[in-house]
Amino acid sequence: MADEPLVLGIETSCDETGVGIVRGHTLLADAVASSVDDHARYGGVVPEIASRAHLEAMVPTIQRALKEAGVAASDLDGIAVTAGPGLAGALLVGVSAAKAYAYALGKPLYGVNHLASHICVDQLEHGALPEPTMALLVSGGHSSLLLAPDITSDVRPLGSTIDDAAGEAFDKVARVLGLGFPGGPAVDRHARDGDPKAIRFPRGLTGPRDAPYDFSFSGLKTAVARWVEAQRRDGLDVPVADVAASFQEAVVDVLTRKAIRACKEHGVDHLMIGGGVAANSRLRSLALERCEDAGIVLRVPRRALCTDNGAMVAALGAEMVARNRPSSTWDLPADSSLPVTEVSVPGHSHPHPEEHTHSHDHVHELSKDNLY
Ligand code: KG4
Ligand code: ZN
């Protein structure tokens, strides 16, 4: 519908320069430039390389998104940007670009949380999120169970990883198996030819006295590394497909079990799964199986919307505009450790930091004092 908010979203928290454009719940453009190949030889994301790549990709990616959406920048109702969490230097490139475009165009600026954006993106796929939404967020940096009564203002963490994130475990196991970086897609691919019951790897924090919604994957990662080392020491071949399948099964077994328990105990009859690991084929199929058994509706966005992208940021920005949430001031900071509970960042000089209802029409005054 033409009266729904038209928002451009910028994502630069890690190694993807993402620019998305949405109108309400409709995806119009999703342009992503990745620097992943530049990091592969280092076995992980190098922050300085990521920042430089964002800088080079920013303007062309914005232009590509506007062209793809067939809209003029002047038609936008707002510019949303990931304010955190993520790599500080990388975030700063996105936040600075968003400020420059918003100020030049006279549009409101919305600094939003990367994690809430991973949840909100599902509105582009499956329509309005139910309230509350139960979300399992699994990425390279986070594994959390979140209860979101309102995705623009109220996200409550029920539990999270106490050590490695799920994606991090995939990346580390892939390294042990010599499958390269990033490891998730490679483990997923090899696991298809393997037996998930070949090796019984530990299921972390699933004892009766363990925290019901917290996760731990570092013990599992160590168990896989020890098993592989023992094989090599004994001069035996490492059955890569079986190790990948058995490791993957241990991760997704715990993730889905805890997510469904959270739904049941909180009386929520649907589950949203987001973040890069939600692209995992076994996680998707086991979650579907277990949700069906439990009478829970599963919502998982298509793979391209699970990994980092700008459309997810635009989706949350559009929801903020639709609900008249306040825009951010020009001194909006990039916060590398932004807590998941802070869905949006008002900016240091926001006149009403506690208020969540005033009009988005107001574009904040720029003065020398409230720019960086
Ligand atoms: O959400 P994301 O793109 O970036 C972060 O915010 O971290 O997630 C990236 C993570 C990486 O650890 C990557 O290995 C993992 O998601 N990943 C996968 C798959 N695709 C990406 N993990 C398992 N299976 C996959 N198919
Ligand atoms: Zn992410």
Image (cartoon, rainbow, N blue to C red):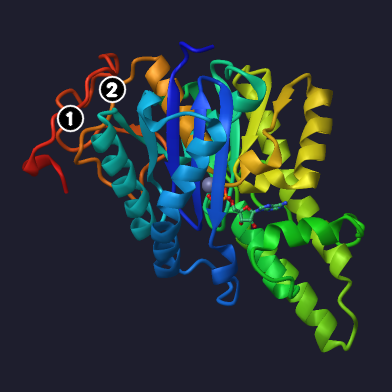
Residue 198's disc is none
Q: Are marks 2 and 1 in contact (CB under 8 Å)?
A: yes
248 lies above or below 230: above
For the N terminus, give its image quadrant: top right
Nearer to the camera, 20 or 288: 20
Residue 216 point in image, percent of width and height: 60, 53
Residue 350's disc is 1
Which amino acid, mark 1?
A: His
**N-terminal label among 2 and 1:** 2
Residue 347 point in image, percent of width and height: 22, 36
268 vs 223, left or right, is left
Residue 209 point in image, percent of width and height: 62, 42
Instruction: Tell me, yes or no, if residue 155 can be seen here.
Output: no
Which amino acid, mark 2?
A: Pro
Nearer to the camera, 293 or 372: 372
Say what secondary structure mark 2 lies in: loop
312 lies above or below 53: above
240 vs 362, left or right, is right
Residue 218 point in image, percent of width and height: 61, 62
Quarter location, residue 26: top right
User: Residue at coordinates 92% horizontally, 57% vertically from top-left?
Assistant: 195
233 lies above or below 45: below
Quarter location, residue 182: bottom right
Residue 326's disc is 2
